[in-house]
Amino acid sequence: MTVRPATDADLPLLGPLEDTGDRQFADLFGDLDWPPADAGEQRAAHPGFLLVAEGDGEVVGFAHVLDLDGHWHLEQLSVDPAHQHRGHGAALLAAALDGVRARGGHDVTLRTYADVPWNGPFYARRGWVEVPDPAWHAPLLEAEARMDLPRHGRRIAMTHPA
Ligand SMILES: CC(C)(COP(=O)(O)OP(=O)(O)OC[C@H]1O[C@@H](n2cnc3c(N)ncnc32)[C@H](O)[C@@H]1OP(=O)(O)O)[C@@H](O)C(=O)NCCC(=O)NCCS
């Protein structure tokens, strides 16, 4: 298992990979009308960094950390369901924190479902703690409202020192 920075060649893989991960939400929530995931190229255009996890020689997951005006935010963590439960998610999470620390950041936030087993509890077991929504999350909350994410469960902010 390897975690490394994403290259341009990896970018086309990221959207389809995230779409397969999102399908497990459909199993829990019922039919979902979520739009297709952002393309990797679109993600790479924002300030921040992208990491990929490789297993058996192929890209099986990624983490996207945004630099939102000096605030570090884990915008997405996704592992292909066919490769889950092998530690790729945990390895990407640890590498994301390392990446923020290496860039001079002191903490990272994310937004997730409090009660989906592979969301809030997964992060809590790795030391992330729930915090009140930071003021600078306001645009993120608006985007979640547009996608109607709170309909499926409580959305929370979590943070971890880098
Ligand atoms: C969250 C995610 C990245 C974890 O990837 P992974 O490679 O399976 O992660 P790991 O192998 O390191 O650990 C898997 C953990 O998820 C938990 N988990 C995964 N699927 C689960 C399920 N269906 N039910 C209960 N727990 C589940 C496991 O218990 C394990 O946690 P533990 O080691 O603390 O017991 C992956 O489930 C995923 O891509 N999900 C869809 C996208 C998503 O929800 N991303 C996070 C958005 S905030």
Image (spheres, rainbow, N blue to C red):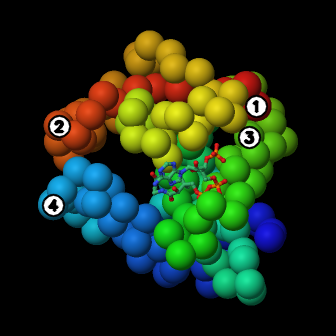
> Percent x, y for residue 155?
34, 30
Lower position in the chain sequence, tag 2 or tag 1: 2
Q: Which residue corresponds to mark 1?
A: 162
Residue 52 as seen in the image, left or right of residue 23: right
Q: Which residue corresponds to mark 2?
A: 151
Secondary structure at numbered mark 2? helix
Image marks 2 and 3: residues in contact by CB distance under 8 Å: no
Rendered-image quadrant of the C terminus: top right
- Looking at the rendered structure, the kind of residue marked 1 is Ala
Depicted 139 relative to depicted 118: above or below: above
- Looking at the rendered structure, the kind of residue marked 3 is Leu
Lower position in the chain sequence, tag 3 or tag 4: 4
Rendering quarter of residue 56: bottom right
Point 59% across, 65% down: residue: 84
Image marks 3 and 4: residues in contact by CB distance under 8 Å: no
Q: Which residue corresponds to mark 3?
A: 97
Mark 4: few/some/many CA within 10 Å (<14, 14-19, 20+) = few
Image marks 3 and 1: residues in contact by CB distance under 8 Å: yes
Mark 3: few/some/many CA within 10 Å (<14, 14-19, 20+) = many
> Percent x, y for residue 134?
45, 17
Q: Measure how far apart labels 3 and 1 are at the Cα level.
A: 5 Å
Mark 1: few/some/many CA within 10 Å (<14, 14-19, 20+) = some
Q: Measure how far apart labels 2 and 3 are at the Cα level.
A: 30 Å
Q: Measure how far apart labels 2 and 4 are at the Cα level.
A: 13 Å
Point 80% across, 43% down: residue: 98
Secondary structure at numbered mark 1? loop
Instruction: Nearest to the eye among marks 2 and 3: give it.
Output: 2
Lower position in the chain sequence, tag 2 or tag 4: 4
- Looking at the rendered structure, the kind of residue marked 4 is Asp
Secondary structure at numbered mark 4? loop
Q: Which residue corresponds to mark 4?
A: 31
